[in-house]
Amino acid sequence: MFKAETHCHTREVSGCSRKSAKYMIKLYKEAGYSTVFISDHFQAGSLDVLGEIPWNEKMTIFLSGYYRAKYEGDLLGITVLPAAEICFDDSANHYLAYGITKEFLDAHPNLHKMSSAEFLPIARAVILSCNNNRGKIKARNCWGNSKNPRSSERGFFIII
């Protein structure tokens, strides 16, 4: 059986996590997972506190949890992939973006300050809306009704 965690935060980057990337990967290995996506918070509040350092250095810091998890995953035989949980000012939703790379992030300074409408053309995304109330996943070719989301929609998945 294939088990994957698609939404994992690390203490190194996301303030809501109490466990280090290394420890998280050990826990997932013990639980029988083969793949973990590190999807730390990517938002203005967590990036702006880094001050006036160059954007590419901010992205190295943002990916530090992923890098540590990847190192541990390589040692333990777990595939660790980068992702990001992105918040936009014009939407109450949180978006999980898969396929995030250092090169993509470096090429888009101030990505964390974009609106969802500005981000969509850059992502060239397939967006899946996760309906938690019914356990269904449906494909969307737009952001949906992000200004007034239905209460059953909790988040979106973006594949870059």
Image: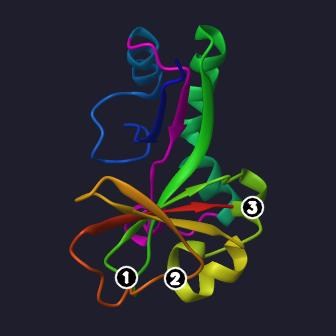
Along the line of sight, which residue is nearer the eye, 99 or 59? 99
Looking at the rendering, which quadrant does residue 81 occupy?
top right
Residue 148 point in image, percent of width and height? 29, 89
Looking at the rendered structure, the secondary structure element under dot 2 is helix
Q: Residues within 10 Å of mark 2 (few under 14, many from 20)?
A: some
Viewer-nearest of discs 3 and 2: 2
Label tally: 3
Residue 48 located within the stretch drawn in magenta? yes
Residue 144 point in image, percent of width and height? 45, 83
- Are the residues flagged by discs 2 and 1 in contact, CB closer than 8 Å? yes
- Are the residues flagged by discs 3 and 1 in contact, CB closer than 8 Å? no
**Residue at (56% x, 40% y) in the render:** 64
Residue 23 point in image, percent of width and height? 40, 19
Dot label at residue 91: 1
The residue pinned by badge 2 equals 116
In the displayed structure, does residue 103 sit left or right of residue 77?
right
Looking at the rendered structure, the secondary structure element under dot 1 is loop
What distance separates the C-alpha of mark 3 from that of mark 2?
Answer: 17 Å
Q: Residues within 10 Å of mark 3 (few under 14, many from 20)?
A: some
N-terminal of the two: label 2 or label 1? 1
Which region is colored magenta?
Answer: 31-53
Along the line of sight, which residue is nearer the eye, 128 or 72? 128
> Amino acid type of disc 2?
Ser
The answer to whether any part of residue 54 appears in the image is no
Residue 48 point in image, percent of width and height? 46, 69
Viewer-nearest of discs 3 and 1: 1
N-terminal of the two: label 3 or label 2? 3
The residue pinned by badge 3 equals 104
